[in-house]
Image (spheres, rainbow, N blue to C red):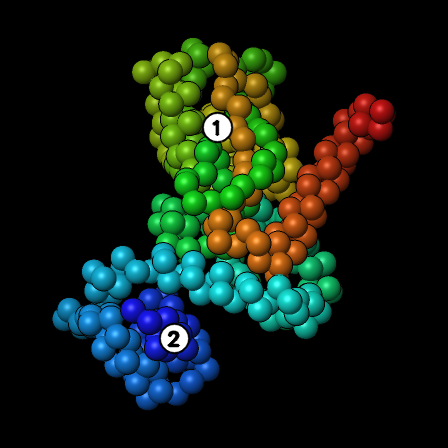
């Protein structure tokens, strides 16, 4: 096929249709009329010899070919825009939309402050924030997430990543718990009901595997998607909450609770910043992610210092 005979202007419209699965929503995204987007769809159907959008009952779905094309179209459009954006990138005037995924704690207690700083230098960047969920893996693979803060485990192929921090798991008990002044043993975990996180991005089973490796007699009475819910469930009970150590140390909701070490060899967990490879050389994305990553690491150091001051360990951190 002759490249010069192709209407490459159709590519952004194709991407919008694949992303939204809707003519009206694609028109809004492209800032064109619905009739104009309908004409684009008609041209795409003829060029690709495929309906692109198919109706089943009252719902519209992507055709099999459209689904197969989605990743390639997303990559091609992004890489093409990168060629021109890199020549004229200026954070102060650039308009970009990015989707960031993170844990509840990251989104509520760390990221807002970072974005406030970010908008002072890049006021026209817009963000959609997503909390980790079982559907997030699919969105990441589909190219619908531009940056993940706190991915656990090895990221999938086709993604770039940097190590963000390392962590371990711990136990939290209420201040009136019988174990508040004792070490937690395997027998304690068998005696007292346990509450644990139900899933973590990238590696949803490491807490479950750890507990099952200790004993088959540990009773998990609840699985919670985030720490605040777990704290409400364990409050004023003899339950034991299994959570992440950094989350427990830095979370503002951890009140009237005591952190305990766990028996055996609790797993060490590596958290990564992850983004699609096609963003690797895009100046806007690089500037955005480096700003977020650097401020994130500074925030972690600030939290560690505050904790050291509270515990009278500030001299250890200054040497």
The residue that disc 1 covers is 242
- From the viewer's perspective, is 203 left or right of 51? right
Q: Residues within 10 Å of mark 1 (few under 14, many from 20)?
A: many
Label 1, secondary structure: give it. strand
The residue that disc 2 covers is 4
Task: Please state which of residues 11 and 263 is positioned toward the viewer in this rendering.
Answer: 11
- Which quadrant of the figure contains the C terminus? top right
Residue for point 56% across, 64% down: 83
Residue 314 lies, in percent from the top left, at: 82, 28
Q: Residues within 10 Å of mark 2 (few under 14, many from 20)?
A: few
In the rendered image, the vertical position of residue 54 relative to residue 99, given as above or below: below
Q: Distance between the Cα atoms at labels 2 and 1?
A: 60 Å
Residue for point 59% across, 67% down: 85
- From the viewer's perspective, is 206 left or right of 303? left
Residue 20 shows in the view: no
Residue 153 lies, in percent from the top left, at: 46, 33
Residue for point 49% across, 21% down: 267
Name the quadrant containing residue 203: top left
Name the quadrant containing residue 191: top left
């Amino acid at each position: 096929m002759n490249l010069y005979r192709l209407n490459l202007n159709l590519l952004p419209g194709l991407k919008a249709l694949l992303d939204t699965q809707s003519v009206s929503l694609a028109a809004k995204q492209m800032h064109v009329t619905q009739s104009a987007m309908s004409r684009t769809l008609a041209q795409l159907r003829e060029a690709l010899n495929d309906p692109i959008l198919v109706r089943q009952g009252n719902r519209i779905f992507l055709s099999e070919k459209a689904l197969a094309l989605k990743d390639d179209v997303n990559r091609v459009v992004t890489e093409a825009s990168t060629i021109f954006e890199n020549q004229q990138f200026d954070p102060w005037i650039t308009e970009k939309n990015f989707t960031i995924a993170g844990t509840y704690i990251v989104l509520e207690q760390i990221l807002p402050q970072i974005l406030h700083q970010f908008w002072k230098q890049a006021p026209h960047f817009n963000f959609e924030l997503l909390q980790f969920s079982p559907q997030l893996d699919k969105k990441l693979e589909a190219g619908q997430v531009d940056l993940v803060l706190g991915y656990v485990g090895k990221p999938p192929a086709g993604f770039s990543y940097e190590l963000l921090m390392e962590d371990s798991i711990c136990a939290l008990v209420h201040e009136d718990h019988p174990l508040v002044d004792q070490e937690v043993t395997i027998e304690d975990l068998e005696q007292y009901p346990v509450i644990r996180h139900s899933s973590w991005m990238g590696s949803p089973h490491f807490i479950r595997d750890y507990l099952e490796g200790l004993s088959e007699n540990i009773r998990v009475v609840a699985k919670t998607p985030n720490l605040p819910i777990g704290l409400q469930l364990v409050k004023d009970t003899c339950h034991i909450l299994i959570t992440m150590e950094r989350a427990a140390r830095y979370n503002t909701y951890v009140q009237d609770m005591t952190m305990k070490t766990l028996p055996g060899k609790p797993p060490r967990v590596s958290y990564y910043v992850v983004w699609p490879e096609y963003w690797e050389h895009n100046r806007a994305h690089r500037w955005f992610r480096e700003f977020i990553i650097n401020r994130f690491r500074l925030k972690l150091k600030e939290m560690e210092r505050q904790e050291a001051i509270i515990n009278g360990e500030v001299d250890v951190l200054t040497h």
